[in-house]
Amino acid sequence: MVRGSRMQLEGLIILVRGGGEMASGVAHRLHRSHFEVCLLEVSQPLAVRRGVSFCEAVYEGEKEVEGVCSKFIPTLEEIHAVWEEGKVPILIDPESKKTRDFLKPHVLIDAIMAKGNLGTKISDAPLVIGLGPGFTGGEDVHFVIETTRGHHLGRVIPEGTAEPDTGIPGDIGGYTVERVLRTMKKGKFHGQRSIGDHVSKGSVVAVVDDYPVIAQISGMLRGLLRDDVEVRKGMKVGDIDPRDKRELCFSISEKSRAIGGGVLEAILHQFNQ
């Protein structure tokens, strides 16, 4: 296990693989804790909770989440300039190797949330952290962070794995699978409503080509894919919050905050000796 000193906390560089909801919650907490954070994404991010996902900067140039701004950059050489602006740089490097070679980060966090390890190794950085199932603490990462809602959410796991993926979304307001919008057809996605809209059970929220995506419950549309992206059958394309509070669509969730707290604990445990 890597050991350090209090002095090493100053100037700690952290790479986060992913820019979706969970990755953004983690990056937000670490940025607010005055670490240098850099996000790595694919060329066409498919975040559903776009109101709180830094990866939207890939499309829009910049994305602000609760007072913290991410900025898309095309080259590695611009990273330090974005940090000087007080923003979180995000660039396209899904394998992370180019950025790791350039920055030589102290910490690498796999926040892709793929339910499996897509290539992250314990040797990628002095401290490597994996979010959720698919990682084994002490083998392919130093620590795993529990991502399943419930008593152990945010727990730091030095040995072993997180709870397995059940395929059932977490309970919010008494609803699980009903609150998630999925398409039953492969094709091009087009939203018919906007994030932050109230939707009623049975209403058409989006279409894939000419096939409707229908709300199974009433509530606030908390997440929705961008228009014109290609989707596959069964893919998650939206999220309805039965609590029906618009402000929740544009603020970091309690789940993301708990996971971010677990990541921060793991970093301090390793370096604040």
Image (tube, grey):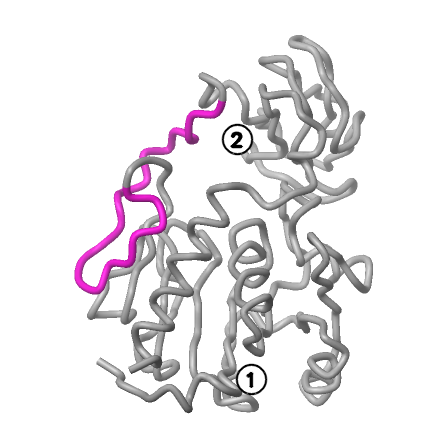
Camera-near label (1 vs 2) is: 1
Which residue shows up at 38% across the image and 69% down it? Answer: 119
Q: Which residues make up the magenta segment?
A: 152-172
Q: What is the secondary structure assignment of the residue under circle 2?
A: loop
Residue 196, relative to residue 122: is it above or below? Answer: above
- As displayed, is residue 115 above or below residue 191? below
Label 1, residues with CA under 10 Å away: few <14, some 14-19, many ≥20: few
Residue 64: percent from the left, percent from the top?
Answer: 75, 57
Q: Secondary structure at mark 1?
A: helix
Majority secondary structure in the magenta region: loop
* Quadrant showing the N terminus: bottom left
- Amino acid identity at mark 1: Lys
The single residue placed furthest to the left in the displayed view is 159
Q: In the image, residue 105 lies at what x, y percent?
A: 48, 84
Q: Measuring from the top left, give residue 210's x and y in whole percent.
A: 76, 23
- Side of 72 where 100 appears, left or right: left
| Quarter holding residue 74 | bottom right
Q: Nearer the viewer, residue 264 or 174?
A: 264
Residues 82 and 161: in front is: 82
- Residue identified by numbered label 2: 234
Task: Kindly identify which residue carries mark 1.
Answer: 98
Q: Residue at x 34, y 56 (%)?
A: 145
Question: Residue 101 at x, y = what percent?
Answer: 51, 90
Mark nearer the N terminus (1 vs 2): 1
Residue placed at 54% from the left, 69% from the top? 33
**How far, Cα to Cα, is label 1 from label 2?**
33 Å
- Residue at 23%, 64% (x, y): give it: 137
